[in-house]
């Protein structure tokens, strides 16, 4: 097996390094200390590697580092990153100069960027390559209620820099009147030492109430065209799948008479054309040129996920001329001159994030512009009013009754989009010449599918990354799976592939929607319940994000990574509040991503972001994680369990808290701050240790369910009556609590053995009891768990945890029995699909009447976790008496045969009568 620990997520070829790549990689405890230098190696050659330290083990050794490479290293399919015993030297790298009124960045590849001082409306003052200016300004453009507003930059800073990469962060707002600052934004510019493209990440907070609707939002780039002849000004628009619309401001090709054949060939190729009067046919050259229209503006609009239109015009007041459109535009454009080059710009996920648009203007002037609209001005206003009028739900009693009907938890004043956010990725690439078809198509490929280096699954697992709930699959390890392992792997693949196809089949795309999936299917009308209360958008319910990320770690599949990335970008931004009254909370599943009144930490949970953050080192995701370091304080602002949890007066400084639903998010936020060594990390560490110790001291441990928490000190108290002294919830453990606790034990047990040991006792008691049956429950807790303590397939991971910690094979067998024979997608589940086609169905595709995203996510998390922790017991569990399948039909026998077993052989091998 290869010793390489780094690979390309997808294969692009050697040119891939010309665009720059950043990646994260984990290290086992104690291997490297802070300040360690690294090299990257391939094919016997080493190159020095820059480094940023992302996280540390509890003993202070490095846990995660991030690195950046571009064309300063050679290409290989795989690499090995390793520590160096001595400091290394870099060849000349990125140079940053910061002065009172400006900041500039220069790279060895010839890029030179100037950033204006705060107070300017420009997010970028100038970009040149090898001394040639290709962008003379860039700014944020927007309109609210149709009124255009100007951006104001408030801060420009070097967020981080190494010899191989610089990251400049520009922050600002949109000025909407003398006293109004709206739509706060961050724009990050990523410049790699040996790359010619620049990555831009634009993030903004939607801090508008329904009476103020966003009507456009974009980035505008100014392109110097000077005195260049109009026939030497070139436009390239990306069509679908790398296709290119090649146009000139004043076209020579297609004319009846005039230019020579060579003139036409040179112009359409983007080369400089010199027109000679002696070669111009039939008319005087200057008169002939005056008869040719000059195209001043172009507009490509992607107003749905399935179609884009293109049009152009000569000047305002003249009609637009329709240009052939298409289905799904790549979202790329180039404007420049044949003699001096120009700028290519592209937006990732262009059609997936519709309504989007690209406008080219002032192409006949000395300075043209490219506007990449993140929200198209041709689209309907971005309405965020509630989708219904309240339905008379003006009391908690009515709201709870309605919850039983539509599964929606509505409350007046809570269906607000004020404070949610969105992030988009844009690339720009300067050219000193008109890009060839191959060059522009390669740029479109970069925009559509940016290169990605990822640590190998074997390396990540051996390092202890995300410990306890995943392991590489058999294919990654080069091993033959057992029949039962193969069957589980097949079901995991089937579930992911189904949802991956459902995104396309049902067009789960759009400005807010891209990245999310729907919650529950309606087999009666053959549609997802997109308009039924809490059954519509999923919003991370029961850890869908975690399922996708664990499945990526498990398989290393590129398509899984991309879907998980899109979900993380959505759920971490759109489903969470970043400002306003609900800051720090996420919103429960609903028809609109913000419409449900249940605002909870279980949705904003850092657990759903941290895997992506560590794999990539992505700074925006790091921001989202940092925002939640003090999420405990949100519990003082709003009692998220106010409608369902009885309680007496709450002491000053304390908040009602659910151990599982809130506690899992708190533990993750504090643990991540601790391991990242974020500012104030010692306080977060103390909060975490105090919280664990407090739960360990409760009369019923995890079974208390509801507690009083002091967010300032981490003190935990039991709730006085009328709050029940204990309560067992079927949902408490389904939002990442068991997974983060497994990682926490691995992280902290050596440094804090006493507290961790005490908490371990109460946690193991709960793990043994939940699926253990009445006798075990009474033994551990003194009471029997209620009948609604369901989701037993999901809770099999708790039994598995206890089995591993106690080295108990009997518990491992019991865990597999619970996984296969309780609820959820059991061993005799029918996994078949129905082929869907009109007129019975709305569109062609497949239907799974049995599917719910809750069940799919929980099966995925549980299967991957159990394979990792007790996979070695699967074969023996399958043959044991307690685990023997119930075969009742010919179909069951067929299933056994299909995995290499028969009823007779199974009975003889397990001694079952």
Image: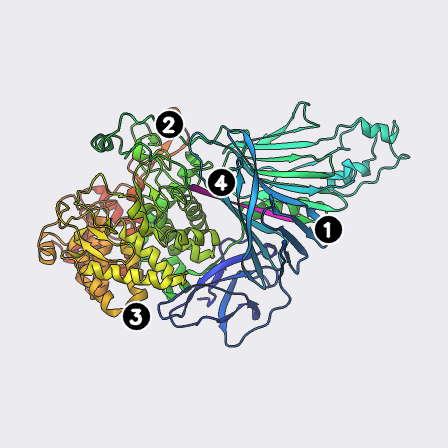
Say whether disc 3 or disc 2 marks the residue closer to the N-terminus: 3
In the displayed structure image, the side of residue 177 where residue 805 appears, left or right: left
Say whether disc 4 or disc 3 marks the residue closer to the N-terminus: 4
Say whether disc 1 or disc 2 marks the residue closer to the N-terminus: 1
Dot label at residue 183: 4
Residue that mark 2 sits on: 841
Magenta-drawn stretch, dominant element (helix, strand or loop) = strand
Residue that mark 3 sits on: 751
How far separated are the C-alphas under marks 3 and 1?
Answer: 57 Å
Say whether disc 4 or disc 1 marks the residue closer to the N-terminus: 1
Contact flag, marks 2 and 4 (Cβ < 8 Å): no
Q: Look at 62% across and 35% down and name the residue there.
A: 359
How far separated are the C-alphas under marks 1 and 2?
Answer: 57 Å
How far separated are the C-alphas under marks 2 and 4?
Answer: 41 Å
Look at discs 3 and 2 and give the one toward the viewer: 3
Mark 2: few/some/many CA within 10 Å (<14, 14-19, 20+): some
Residue stretch rendered in magenta on the structure: 420-429
Look at discs 4 and 1 and give the one toward the viewer: 4
Mark 1: few/some/many CA within 10 Å (<14, 14-19, 20+): some
Residue that mark 1 sits on: 132
Q: Which structural element holds mark 4?
A: strand
Mark 4: few/some/many CA within 10 Å (<14, 14-19, 20+): many
Q: Which structural element holds mark 3?
A: loop
In the displayed structure image, the side of residue 620 where residue 741 appears, left or right: left
- Among the 4 quarters of the image, the one containing residue 298: top right
How far separated are the C-alphas under marks 4 and 3?
Answer: 44 Å
In the image, residue 82 lies at what x, y percent? Answer: 49, 70
Q: Which structural element holds mark 2?
A: loop
């Amino acid at each position: 097996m290869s010793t390489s620990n780094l690979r390309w997520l997808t294969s692009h070829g050697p040119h891939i390094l010309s665009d720059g790549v950043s990646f994260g990689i984990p290290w086992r405890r104690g291997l490297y200390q802070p300040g360690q230098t690294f090299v990257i190696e391939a094919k016997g050659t080493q190159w020095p590697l820059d480094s940023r330290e992302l996280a540390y083990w509890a003993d202070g050794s490095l846990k995660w580092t991030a690195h950046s490479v571009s064309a300063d290293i050679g290409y290989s399919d795989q690499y090995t990153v390793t520590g160096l015993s001595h400091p290394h030297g870099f060849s000349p790298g990125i140079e940053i100069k910061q002065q009172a009124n400006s900041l500039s960045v220069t790279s060895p590849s010839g890029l030179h960027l100037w950033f204006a001082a705060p107070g300017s409306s420009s997010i970028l003052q100038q970009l040149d390559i090898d001394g040639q200016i290709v962008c003379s300004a860039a700014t944020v453009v927007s309109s609210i209620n149709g009124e255009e507003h100007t951006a104001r930059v408030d801060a420009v800073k070097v967020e981080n820099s190494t010899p191989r990469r610089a990251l400049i962060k520009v922050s600002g707002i949109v000025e909407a009147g003398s006293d109004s600052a709206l739509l706060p934004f961050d724009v990050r510019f990523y410049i790699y030492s040996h790359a010619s493209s620049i990555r831009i990440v634009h993030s903004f907070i939607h801090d508008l109430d329904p009476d103020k609707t966003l009507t456009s939002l974009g980035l505008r780039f100014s392109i110097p065209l000077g005195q260049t002849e109009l026939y030497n000004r070139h436009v390239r628009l990306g069509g679908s799948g790398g296709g290119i619309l090649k146009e000139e401001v004043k076209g020579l090709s297609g004319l009846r008479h005039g230019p020579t054949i060579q003139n036409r060939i040179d112009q359409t190729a983007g080369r400089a054309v010199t027109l000679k009067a002696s070669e111009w046919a039939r008319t005087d050259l200057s008169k002939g040129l005056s008869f040719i229209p000059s195209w001043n503006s172009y507009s490509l609009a992607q107003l749905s996920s399935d179609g884009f239109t293109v049009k152009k015009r000569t000047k305002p007041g003249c009609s637009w001329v329709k240009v052939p459109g298409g289905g799904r535009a790549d979202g790329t454009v180039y404007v420049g001159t044949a003699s001096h080059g120009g700028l290519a710009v592209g937006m990732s996920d262009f059609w997936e994030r519709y309504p989007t648009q690209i406008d080219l203007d002032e192409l006949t002037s000395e300075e043209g512009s490219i506007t990449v609209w993140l929200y198209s001005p041709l689209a309907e206003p971005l309405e965020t009013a509630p989708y219904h009028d309240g339905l008379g739900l003006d009391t908690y009693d009515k709201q709870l009754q309605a919850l039983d009907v539509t599964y929606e938890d509505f409350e007046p004043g809570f269906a607000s989009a004020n404070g949610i956010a969105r992030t988009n990725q844009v690339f720009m690439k300067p050219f000193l010449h008109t890009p060839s078809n191959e060059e522009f198509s390669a740029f479109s490929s970069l925009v559509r599918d940016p290169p990605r280096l990822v640590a190998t699954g074997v390396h990540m697992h051996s390092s202890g990354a995300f410990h306890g709930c995943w392991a590489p699959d058999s294919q990654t390890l080069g091993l033959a799976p057992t029949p039962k392992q193969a069957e589980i792997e097949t079901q995991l693949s089937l579930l992911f592939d189904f949802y991956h196809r459902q995104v396309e089949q049902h067009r789960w795309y759009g400005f807010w929607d891209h990245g999310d999936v729907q919650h529950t299917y309606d087999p009666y009308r053959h549609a997802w319940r997109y308009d039924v209360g809490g059954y519509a958008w999923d919003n991370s319910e029961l850890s869908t994000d975690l399922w996708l990320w664990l499945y990526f770690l498990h398989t290393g599949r590129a398509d899984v990574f991309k879907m998980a990335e899109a979900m993380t970008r959505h759920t971490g931004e759109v489903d969470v509040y970043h400002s306003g009254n609900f800051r720090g909370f996420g919103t429960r599943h609903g028809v609109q991503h913000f419409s449900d009144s249940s605002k909870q930490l279980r949705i904003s949970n850092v657990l759903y972001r941290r895997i992506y953050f560590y794999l990539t080192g992505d700074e925006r995701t790091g921001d989202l994680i940092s925002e939640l370091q003090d999420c405990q304080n949100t519990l003082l602002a709003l009692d998220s369990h106010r409608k369902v949890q009885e309680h007496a007066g709450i002491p000053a400084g304390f908040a009602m808290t659910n151990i599982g639903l809130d506690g899992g998010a708190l533990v993750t936020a504090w643990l991540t701050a601790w391991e990242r060594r974020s500012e104030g990390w010692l306080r977060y560490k103390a909060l975490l240790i105090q919280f664990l110790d407090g739960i360990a001291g409760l009369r019923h441990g995890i079974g208390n369910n509801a507690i009083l928490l002091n967010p300032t000190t981490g003190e935990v108290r039991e709730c006085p009556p009328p709050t029940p002294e204990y309560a067992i919830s079927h949902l408490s453990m389904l939002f990442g609590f068991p997974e983060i606790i497994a990682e926490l034990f691995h992280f902290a047990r050596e440094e804090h053995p006493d507290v961790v040991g005490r908490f371990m006792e109460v946690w193991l008691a709960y793990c043994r009891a939940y699926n253990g049956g009445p006798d075990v429950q009474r033994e551990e807790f003194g009471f029997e768990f209620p009948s609604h303590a369901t989701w037993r397939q999901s809770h099999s991971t708790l039994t598995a945890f206890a089995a591993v910690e106690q080295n108990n094979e009997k518990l491992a067998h019991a865990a597999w029995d619970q996984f296969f024979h309780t609820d959820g997608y059991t061993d005799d589940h029918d996994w078949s699909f129905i082929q869907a086609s009109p007129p019975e169905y709305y569109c062609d595709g497949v239907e799974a009447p049995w599917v719910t995203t809750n069940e799919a996510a929980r099966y995925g998390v549980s299967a991957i976790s159990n394979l990792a922790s007790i996979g070695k017991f699967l074969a023996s569990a399958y043959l044991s008496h307690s685990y023997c399948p119930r075969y009742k039909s010919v179909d069951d026998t067929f299933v056994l045969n299909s995995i290499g077993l028969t009823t007779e052989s199974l009975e003889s091998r397990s001694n079952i009568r």
